[in-house]
Amino acid sequence: AQSVTQLGSHVSVSEGALVLLRCNYSSSVPPYLFWYVQYPNQGLQLLLKYTTGATLVKGINGFEAEFKKSETSFHLTKPSAHMSDAAEYFCAVRSSGANSKLTFGKGITLSVRP
Amino acid sequence: GVTQSPTHLIKTRGQQVTLRCSSQSGHNTVSWYQQALGQGPQFIFQYYREEENGRGNFPPRFSGLQFPNDSSELNVNALELDDSALYLCASSLAVGSGYTFGSGTRLTVV
């Protein structure tokens, strides 16, 4: 079984400040890990993913995440928040099996203050 | 990309509904997710080359089809009020490649 925990439902930062969104996962097999962003009334857009190899993954819009196996974490960061980053962010885990599914966390709402 | 239709739908309790999805060209795997308000998406089922190969904790009145032309359907019978949600379709080229999501269909059951 696999699961994702996203601590806190809402994060608020000032424009230009560091963004840190936490994600911890549970998986019985080596996981594939994803971060998605959802803007109001829209579907999910892939920000970045970790499958194998380098544990620091860079994504779109200046976001990056680091896979830490020992901590079972995949936290999302961005050095400097922009107003356009305000959205809902979902962490997801998927096992490597052929019929595996994406399991999502409950999501974190990011607000950016001017 | 992935396109879904319709974008919004209102149905009455007890009715049946069909939601449609057109996958990204060449993607052989399609999945459907239900996203209730304020929640993360929940896996309904997945199809690989027109056969169901994974199912989440949803009752049999949720069913699906995948067609050879990169299209798929989600059917829900005997609609209940709790079925009101955003339904997302996602396609994938291969395991680990990441899913491409559509914009979803907002279903309201009254």
Image (cartoon, helix red, strand yellow):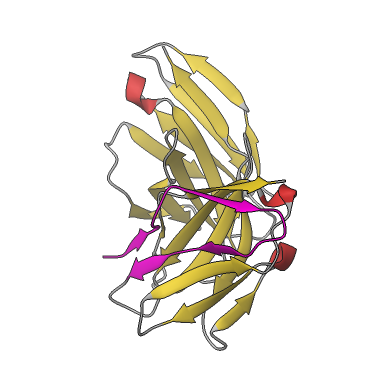
Image quarter (top left, top right, bottom left or bottom right) of the N terminus of chain A: bottom left
Task: State the image coordinates of residue A39 (x, y, percent, origin top left).
Answer: 64, 42
Q: Is residue A15 magenta?
A: yes
Q: Is residue A15 above or below residue B34?
A: below
Q: Residue at x 46, y 14 (%)?
A: B11
Q: Is residue B79 visible?
A: no
Q: Residue at x 36, y 68 (%)?
A: A25
Task: State the image coordinates of residue B28 (x, y, percent, origin top left).
Answer: 57, 60
Q: Residue at x 62, y 44 (%)?
A: B102
Task: State the image coordinates of residue B84 (x, y, percent, origin top left).
Answer: 42, 25
The answer to which quarter of the image holds residue A24 is bottom left
Q: Is residue B43 visible?
A: yes
The magenta region covers A1-26
Q: Nearer the viewer, residue B70 or A46?
A: A46
Q: Nearer the viewer, residue B110 or A16?
A: A16
Task: State the image coordinates of residue A73 (x, y, percent, origin top left).
Answer: 41, 73
Q: Is residue A41 above or below residue B102?
A: above
The answer to which quarter of the image holds residue A57 is bottom right
Q: Is residue B109 magenta?
A: no
Q: Residue at x 42, y 70 (%)?
A: A98
* Left or right: A42 in relation to A28: right
Q: Residue furthest bottom?
A: A53
* Left or right: B48 in relation to A43: left
Q: How many marks?
A: 0
* Left or right: A51 in relation to A84: left
